[in-house]
Amino acid sequence: MRAGRLRHKAQVFVPSSTTNDFGEVDASFDLMGTYACELKSRVRREMNEVQAKVSTTQYDLAFRYYAPLAAIPKQSYFIVEGVKLHILSMANDGLRNRMILARCEERS
């Protein structure tokens, strides 16, 4: 395993729908848990916006396999070291139930 590389802690927030006093549905996010992960950042693409070149940074997160973590919806997000990361894709590495790989992006 990659026990020595799982140095970061990621908080996982999943969507939940609750009702308020008037019966309206409130879309909110609940903390599902905190998991150890490996974090790699990579500059993926560059765009031209208003006479400036803007680069987008995507993050690759690697987790040990946990069944609840493998089943989270795509609307969920991670918070790693104060940075909110939105999920672009999640995959079970090799379908061997050993590692979960998540590709995320920071949005402003």
Image (cartoon, grey):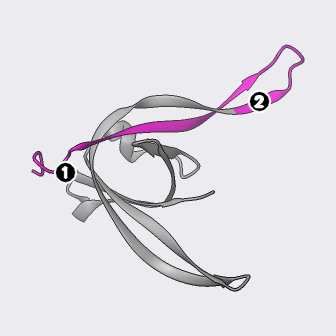
Question: Dot 2, crowdedness within 10 Å: few (<14), some or many (≥20)?
Answer: few
Residue nearest the viewer, comparing 96 with 76: 76
86 vs 50, left or right, is left
- Span colored in magenta: 1-27
Element under disc 2: strand
Instruction: Work out which quarter of the rendered image holds the C terminus and state it.
Output: bottom right
* Residue drawn at (45%, 77%) of the image: 44
Residue 72 visible from this viewpoint: no
Let me know if residue 3 is in the magenta part: yes
* Residue drawn at (26%, 61%) of the image: 93
Let me know if residue 7 is in the magenta part: yes
Element under disc 1: loop
* Residue drawn at (67%, 32%) of the image: 28
Residue 21 locus on image (x, y percent): 85, 13
Task: Quadrant for residue 54, please give it.
Answer: bottom right
Which sits earlier in the primary sequence, circle 2 or circle 1?
2
The mark found on residue 26 in the picture is 2
The mark found on residue 98 in the picture is 1
Residue 57 visible from this viewpoint: yes
Q: Are marks 2 and 1 in contact (CB under 8 Å)?
A: no
Residue 8 locus on image (x, y percent): 28, 43
Q: Nearer the viewer, mark 2 or mark 1?
A: 2
Residue 58 locus on image (x, y percent): 44, 66
